[in-house]
Image (cartoon, grey):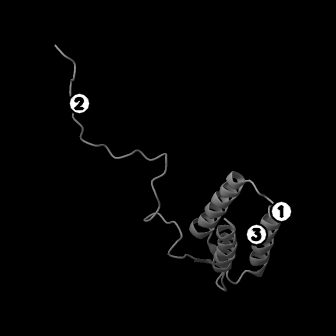
Amino acid sequence: MRSKVLALFRSLHRTSQSTFMGDEVALNAARKRINDEFRENKDETDPDEIKHMIKVGVDVELLMKKTIVQAKLNEKGRYEIRVTEDTLREDNAPPSSKQKAPETNRTETNTESR
């Protein structure tokens, strides 16, 4: 279990470094938050709680990879965004719950006895 926690710690730091590349304020805030969360929970011994915290950490890492983009104001007064291959876009995003699932051709069979 300890090795999974340490691997997640390292992975979160790597993900934050690539997500916030070039933004020292965001990098420092992410680094501090990750370190604080792990330090705050370092004495946890309940395996179920540790598994839950690992799941939360994995989810946070996925959110960082998929949903955060950097925007920088250029000299023309326009924002340039840095999108990675992991960033969710219209062409690679999973269907939202508001979208209707595609209709399927389904035949109903009457199984009642006569």
Name the foreground residue: 49 vs 100: 49
Dividing the image into 4 quarters, which one contains the C terminus?
A: top left
Which callout, 3 or 2, points to the residue nearer the camera?
3
Query: In the picture shown, does residue 18 fall above or below 3?
Result: below
The residues bearing labels 3 and 2 have C-alpha atoms spaced at a distance of 53 Å
Tag 2 residue: 108
Q: Is residue 85 left or right of residue 48?
A: left
| Residue 40: image tag | 1
Tag 3 residue: 34
**Residue type at numbered disc 1:** Glu
The numbered mark, 1 or 3, whose residue comes first in the sequence reads 3
Q: Is residue 29 left or right of residue 114?
A: right
The image position of residue 83, as x and y in percent, is 55, 75
Crowding around mark 2 (Cα neighbors within 10 Å: few <14, some 14 to 19, many 20+) is few
Q: Secondary structure at mark 2?
A: loop
Crowding around mark 1 (Cα neighbors within 10 Å: few <14, some 14 to 19, many 20+) is few
The image position of residue 41, as x and y in percent, is 80, 61
Which quarter of the picture shows residue 28?
Answer: bottom right
| Residue lying at the far top of the rendered structure | 114
Query: How many dots with numbers?
Result: 3
Q: Secondary structure at mark 3?
A: helix
The residues bearing labels 1 and 2 have C-alpha atoms spaced at a distance of 56 Å
**Residue type at numbered disc 3:** Ile
| Residue lying at the far left of the rendered structure | 114
The image position of residue 20, as x and y in percent, is 68, 77
Dividing the image into 4 quarters, which one contains the N terminus?
A: bottom right
The residues bearing labels 1 and 3 have C-alpha atoms spaced at a distance of 10 Å
The numbered mark, 3 or 2, whose residue comes first in the sequence reads 3
Query: In the picture shown, does residue 11 fall above or below 56?
Result: below
Name the foreground residue: 113 vs 33: 113
**Residue type at numbered disc 2:** Glu
Give me the residue at 67% from left, 86% from top: 75
